[in-house]
Image (cartoon, rainbow, N blue to C red):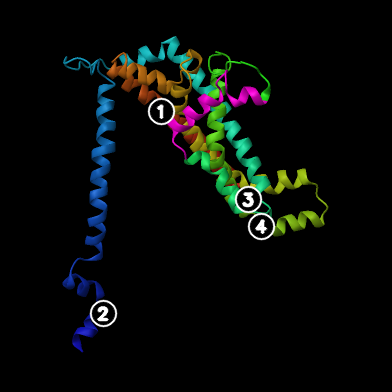
Amino acid sequence: MTTDVITRLDPQSHAAKRGLSDLSIRNLFIIPTILFLIVFNIFPLLYSLYYSFTDFRASTNAAANFVGLQNYRELLNDPFIWNNFVITAKYVIVSVAGQVIVGFGVALLLNRDIPYKGLITTLLLLPMMLSMAVVGLFWKLLYDPSFGIINYALGLGTFEWLANPDMALYAVAITDIWMWSPFVMLLSLAGLSAVPKHLYEAAAIDRAGSLYTFFRITLPLVAPILMIAIIFRTMEAFKTFDLAYILTSQPTTEVLSIRLYKMAFQEWQTGRSCALAYIMLIVVVAITNIYVKYLNKVKER
């Protein structure tokens, strides 16, 4: 009788007597995760940050000499690196804009009662579930000037998509749009399904046109989740490597990630490549912060 009263008054002390407390169980799960993140994420991050201030080369046994901001100064004054920035910016703009237009457009078409809607949505999601290497090799065959189906469908003969310096970057962007538009579509569908139906009913009663309904109801309410999709896709597009590396080796498609790879594993400029990686990180963080601030303004409207 006395034990039951004590248990009701202080259940935590009774649980502690029986075994581990809730706090101990929580720490038992959290501490290994924190240690894992420190070892495999934070430690390499700090270690590479140290190397970015040195002239270290992984191909030699020479000790790393501290050079301060020299690597950063040389990179920011290198016209070839700025050219890589321009190529990357062009690729990000074309790729992300295409994904938003295609993904949101398809989501609008699917946001209605149509037969086999679930099956169609599942099939449209397949591209983003594939491996980057598989997608790259698959589209390389599609772009082939001899037997590629794209030239045959468009009637372009033996047009060189990947060998043409002016079209190679756009060919890579088209592949990225095909692969990741379903991601934007999925988020857009979630946003469209959350729009209250009574708003459309009220607009119909007021005899509002389809364009007015789209720009006054649909787009403002879906804009926050659409901005989230843009943030994620911008970050990924800025870091793209696989598709551009597999599809073509044109200088006009040498985005920053490929330049970083060549600098680190072909030229063995380890310290300088670490500095370039951190410059890319700063740019991505800056762009993300701009998007997040704009997202907060959109939410406040």
Q: Nearer the viewer, residue 285 or 230?
A: 230
For the residues labelled 4 and 2, the Cα–Cα distance comes to 47 Å
Left or right of residue 1: residue 147: right
Q: Nearer the viewer, residue 269 or 68?
A: 269
Q: Nearer the viewer, residue 109 or 45?
A: 109
Residue displayed at 68% across by 53% down: 112
User: Total marks drawn?
Assistant: 4
Give the magenta part as a residue range: 130-153
CA neighbours of label 1 inside 10 A, class few (<14), some (14 to 19), many (20+): few
CA neighbours of label 4 inside 10 A, class few (<14), some (14 to 19), many (20+): few
Q: Mark 2 vs mark 3: which is more N-terminal?
A: 2
Indicate which label's residue lies in the foreground, 2 or 1.
Answer: 1
For the residues labelled 3 and 1, the Cα–Cα distance comes to 33 Å
Name the amino acid, label 2: Leu
Name the amino acid, label 1: Ile
Which label sits on residue 282? 1
Q: According to the image, label 3 marks what residue?
A: 192
Q: According to the image, label 2 marks what residue?
A: 9
Name the amino acid, label 3: Leu
Q: Main secondary structure of the magenta part?
A: helix
- Point out residue 172 in the picture as x, y percentages from the top left corner: 53, 24
Is label 4 in a helix, a strand or a loop?
loop
Reply yes or no: does residue 156 show up in magenta: no
Q: Mark 2 vs mark 1: which is more N-terminal?
A: 2
